[in-house]
Image: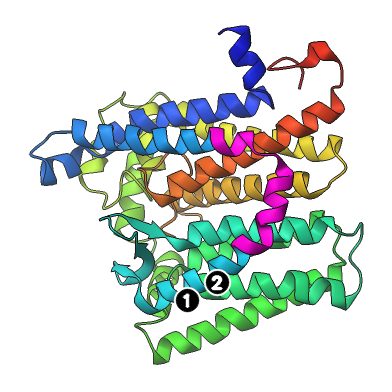
Amino acid sequence: MSSRVYSELRGDSVIWMIVALLAMFSIIIVYSATGTLAFKYYKGDTTSYLLKQIGILGLGLFLTYICYLLHPKRYSKMAATLFLISIPLLVYTLAAGVGVNQARRWIEVPFTSLTFQTSDFAKIALLMYLAKALSITDYIKDFSSAFMPIIVPVIIICGLIAPADGSTAALLFLTCMMMMFIGRVDLKYIVLLIMCGVVLFAFLFILGEIFPEIVRSGTWTSRLRDFWFSEDGGYQVQQSKMAIASGGVFGEGPGNSIIRNYLPSPYADFIYAIICEEYGMIGGLAIIGLYLLLLFRVARLVTVSNKGFGAMLALGLALSIVIQALANVAVAVHLLPVTGLTLPMVSYGGTSLIFTCISFGIILSVSKNIQKITEPEPEAEGFGKQ
């Protein structure tokens, strides 16, 4: 690689490597996992899904680079605006969104046949807004600076996401709670947030019993029942565990998955099971290792910075990606109820993939600018020192 490219792609080189590895692995595993879909809709033409994945991933990586170029101060200025935009988008989605599998999570993009999952946009908007609120003061210990600027926005966004996508709302809530803890919010206000969250989900559950077409409380109940009272966790989890077990240590080899023909979503929710079947325990641990390495590198950025807006935003986005990845893995091995969450940057493309790429771009932007502060020497430019 030329020195010109090295000079342009600054920031944490390990995070760049993680993005590249996850992207390459996504193309390989999605090509294998979409075989059943190809036979169902394209008469066995698996190239169609491969080209779609490459196209969506290419757009996502382009947005990664665009977001990487922007200074973190730009995101700070956009935080409030994006947060305010996300609220009517979520309300519109609940009222008139596109329904898929009895869940209204998408809206149609005007003048196209494309759909857009508004919760992915709202998630980044909330984390950006929360990072800005947490970076204003060193230690938040009074009610006025904790409740309205922090707790209320979290409850609003999670409350609007939860009716159609309870899993995303719960993981976003957990991410925000961890950001508050790291952002030096007094513990009593974190407890207050937890109490508000419990009340919110209880209210939504009751609302779902009355209006099941609005809140998917029936889905929540059935998934929890399968998790707690069914030994095999239901059909999907049973097939997932069979795939993982058949993979052994080294796997069946690329493209040799059998369980992909029986799993309902082998290219999305249960793609980790296909990874383990084809690449074995080694491949499964390698994927988990990449996500944990991402969290470690971003945590390192926070420790060497002044814990301002950029560092808190990067940490929030990294936590969101890693928690979702671990939740996806936990579902595949029957440690959590079925959630419907994808494996970030790896599962078959869509809004989730695009916004994961955007998250990586923002993280890299922060790492680039923290690097400029902590490594003032001219020779430290580029992929060199971290």
Residue that carries the numbered disc 1 in the rendered image: 91
Q: Is residue 3 left or right of residue 340?
A: right
The dot on residue 87 is 2
Q: Residue at x 63, y 20 (%)?
A: 8
In the displayed structure image, the side of residue 71 where residue 208 appears, left or right: left
Q: For the magenta stretch, what is the residue range?
A: 65-82
Q: Where is residue 234 shown, x and y percent of the image?
A: 33, 61
Q: Farthest left residue? A: 43
Query: Is residue 232 shown to the viewer in this render?
Result: no
Percent x, y of residue 170: 57, 66
Q: Is residue 108 magenta?
A: no
Q: Main secondary structure of the magenta part?
A: helix
User: Measured from the top left, where is residue 12 in percent x and y?
Assistant: 69, 27
Position of residue 251 measured from the top left corner of the image (x, y, whole percent) = 36, 27
Q: Residue furthest top?
A: 2
Image quadrant in which the C terminus is located: top right
Label 2 with label 1: CB-CB less than 8 Å: yes
The quadrant holding residue 114 is bottom left
Residue 186 visible in the snapshot = yes
SS of the residue at dot 1? helix
Amino acid on which disc 2 is placed? Ile
Q: Is 69 colored magenta in this rendering?
A: yes
Q: Determine whether the residue tagged by mark 2 lies in a helix, strand or loop.
A: helix
Is residue 112 left or right of 119 when viewed as pictured? left
The Cα atoms of the two marked residues, 2 and 1, are separated by 6 Å
Q: Look at the picture and state if 356 lies above or below 150.
A: above
